[in-house]
Image (cartoon, rainbow, N blue to C red):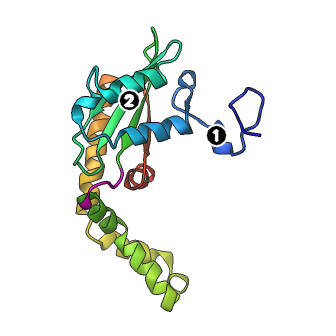
Amino acid sequence: HAYNGSEGVEPPYPVCSLRWGHARHHISTIDLAILSAYTYVVNSSAYEEGGEVCNAMQQTFSIGRVSAKIVHHQEYYKVGRIIATRFVQQDEPLGTTVLAIKGSSTPYDFFVDATLWAMISVFQAMSILVPILDQMPNWVFALVLYLFPHWHEREIFENIRDVHMKLTRLYPNDEFVLTGHSLGGGIAIA
């Protein structure tokens, strides 16, 4: 017996019933996954009016009085690339803007991914031989992670901040949601 989204029927996993952004927009976890998948399209023109992703997004998400539109997109090769989609109900100023962050897909993305998580991986690997994670206080690890170089992180998070600030000025009444896949998911929850 498969769950079909019917009212009054409990989904098999609680995350299936979560909704994001303004209540009228009904953005589900699956919707966030779809938006994250759209970040992997290489051709920038696909995000413009009449482009492949733009058309697919309008067909998928523009239902009833709610419409979805891509309001910001970045070049494919930018680490932490953001595709921003705005959901709005007709004749209302309240919107939900979803910033979807692309994950690892190029060799450079994988390099950045490795540098972001390298120190944690070293600690975990060392713990196989010597249980240092259990022996030392957490503040020691926090200090080491703080002192570890953060140049990639700074660039990625400044990009997210800049895009968010720009869109907040354009849509001051919107709720903003961050999502992503792989590296993008890690960045979204950081």
SS at badge 2: strand
The x and y percentages for residue 179 are 44, 43
SS at badge 1: helix
Which amino acid lies under the numbered mark 2 shown in the image of this protein? Answer: Thr
- Is residue 189 in view? yes
Which amino acid lies under the numbered mark 1 shown in the image of this protein? Answer: Cys
In the image, which disc is placed on residue 85? Answer: 2
Between 137 and 127, the one nearer to me in the picture: 127
- Tell me: 84 left or right of 141: left
How far apart marks 1 and 2 lie (CA) works out to: 21 Å
- What is the quadrant of residue 91 in the picture? top left
Magenta stretch, main secondary structure, is loop
Residue 150 among those drawn in magenta: no
Q: Alpha-carbon neighbours of circle 2 within 10 Å: few (<14), some, or many (≥20)?
A: many
- Please state, as top left, top right, bottom left or bottom right, where the C terminus lies in the image: bottom left
In the image, which disc is placed on residue 16? Answer: 1
Q: How many marks?
A: 2
- Tell me: 7 left or right of 24: right
Report the span colored magenta. Answer: 103-107
- Tell me: 175 left or right of 157: right
Give the residue at the far top of this rendering. 91
The x and y percentages for residue 164 are 32, 36
Placement of 113 over or under 56, stated as above or below: below
Give the residue at the far bottom of this rendering. 129
* Residue name at image x 30 percent, y 62 percent: 110
